[in-house]
Structure formats: C-alpha cells, structure tokens
Amino acid sequence: MSYKVIVDSCGELTPEMKASGIFETASLTIEVGGHHIVDDETFDQKQFLQYVAEAAECPKSSCPSPEKYMEKYDCDVDRVYAVTLSAELSGSYNSAVLGMNLYHEEHGEKNIHVFNSCSASIGETLIALKIRECEEQDMTYEQVIETVEAYIESQHTYFVLETLDTLRKNGRLTGLQAFFATKLNIKPVMGADHGVIIKLDQARGIQKALQRMVEIVVKDAGTVEDKCLTIAHCNAPERAQYVKEKFEQAAKFKKIIVTETAGLATVYAGDGGIIVAV
C-alpha cells in the first residue's frame, strides 16, 4: 500500500524524512513585527529570532486552512495520515479534520486519518516516524491507527526554556509562574499532560534544569532500549549536544535524534530552548 504522512509545521522533519518522499509539511504562518512568515523550508531561524527581539508584541500564528489540508489529501496514494500539534494548543487538528470532511464531500471515500499528537515539535516527529514503522511492517490501515494512537498515549514531551515570556503572553502559563522563574533565575522543567503544559520540577540555572530534565525523562521512560528519543534546540547546538551526552550517559536509547526547531516551535521555545520527546 502507498501512503503519505502530513505533519503540520510545528513538527520538525529531519533531512532524511524530507528526502524520503513520504513526509510532507502543512505550513502554519507567523506574524511578528509586521513580518509575515511562512513556516516552510524558507524559514530562517536566526532572522526570525531577530524579528522577535525587535518586536514589541508577541508573535502570532495561524494554522493551515481546511482547504490547504484538503489539497494535501488529494494525492495518488492509498492512505493519508496527518499529524497535528495538540488540539489543546492550536486549531490545526480541527482544521485537518475539517479538511478531511471536505475531501470526502468532494471526492468520496479515502483512507485519511488525523492524529492529535497531544504534543508539539519533535513529539509530532516521533509520531510520524511511528506511522512509517507501522507501514513498513505491513500493518492494515486499522492496525496502524490503533498502534499509533496507543503510542501517542504513551509518549511524553519535556522542555526547558531560557524564558517563559512567550508562553505567558499567549496564555499558556500564569503570569506568576513566569515572574518567579525570571526574577529568581529559576528554570522550570516543563512537560505535557494530554496536550496541556505542566510544570514537573525546577532548578536554579539552565544547566541544572537540563540535568534534572534528563533524570525525569529517564525515570519516566522505564525500559529504553527499544525507544527513540528526540532533542530539538532553538539556536543552541552546543546545549543540545550537552543534553544528548547526558542521555547517553544515563541510559541506552535505541536512537537519539537531534534537530533544530522549526518556525512555530521556535516561537514557543525561544532562543536557547531545548525540547525532548520520547
């Protein structure tokens, strides 16, 4: 069976995924400081971070329209899967489902399934890779959906950021949480609980917070020999390498992937942010 996996652009596609011909991005758009940015292969992270630093207001994003999703579903494959960022954080999931309904109304039945990642960024990446793994095992369409949905339930996303300002301004945190984290140099270790951002722990200074995150991830993950771990960084390759080495010292994951944040993940991670999913 032929298939395609569409990932909204909050999820990062590795160079290998882009070259495979299987994965495709549904681009969100971002507005900041009078600049309109399409979150696709033209996204320039350093330029974007400069725009954010110079802008008085917080960046605002728009998800792909249902019509855009419908266009991507209209392709010559037997199965189409879409992976979107958490429905708790964006309208991308609802837009993808509406696009599926529009496709069925105009073109008839087709195997299209939309996965709510209950995550973001590289959490979506891992889900997309899980879909490919299932397809390569020659699972039925129903088996792929069942297996991937179970995987989403078991997956966890973690992050440590230099600043919580963007999350606070976009209503993802209370102002009090952001205030204390900023004034006391307290860096929270954050996670996602069914798509909702929660604080797991905290430490004074970024290095200690990253170390604490590694400890929490390894403890939560349990047996890791068959698990892939991903690390996304926002303009912080050395920090990402540090985290990778800490994970390698702490546990023997099946594979560790390191990548840069794409556009929307860059908005929320901010300069220096680190995101981990497993």
Image (cartoon, rainbow, N blue to C red):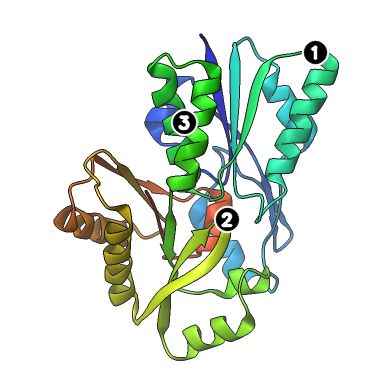
- Determine if residue 14 is in view: yes
Instruction: Give the SS element for disc 2.
Output: loop
Instruction: Give the SS element for disc 3.
Output: helix
Which residue bears the numbered disc 1? 107
Q: Amino acid at mark 2?
A: Gly
Residue at horizontal 67%, vertical 68%? 170
Residue 147: mark: 3
Instruction: List x then y, in percent, for residue 136.
Output: 39, 17
Label 2 or label 1, whichever lies nearer to me, is 2
| Mark 1 vs 3: CB contact within 8 A | no
40 and 247: which one is in front?
247
| Mark 2 vs 1: CB contact within 8 A | no
Q: Earlier in the sequence, mark 3 or mark 2?
A: 3
Position of 235 relative to 125 (above/below): below
Which residue bears the numbered disc 2? 195
**Side (left or right) of 164 relative to 103:** left
Q: Earlier in the sequence, mark 1 or mark 3?
A: 1
Label 1 or label 3, whichever lies nearer to me, is 3
Q: Amino acid at mark 3?
A: Thr
Mark count: 3
90 and 218: which one is in front?
218
Residue at horizontal 58%, vertical 26%? 81
Density class for disc 1 (Cα within 10 Å; few <14, some 14-19, many ≥20) is: few
Density class for disc 3 (Cα within 10 Å; few <14, some 14-19, many ≥20) is: some
Residue at horizontal 70%, vertical 71%? 57
Instruction: List x then y, in percent, for residue 278.
Output: 37, 48
- Spatial CA distance of label 2 from label 1 is 32 Å
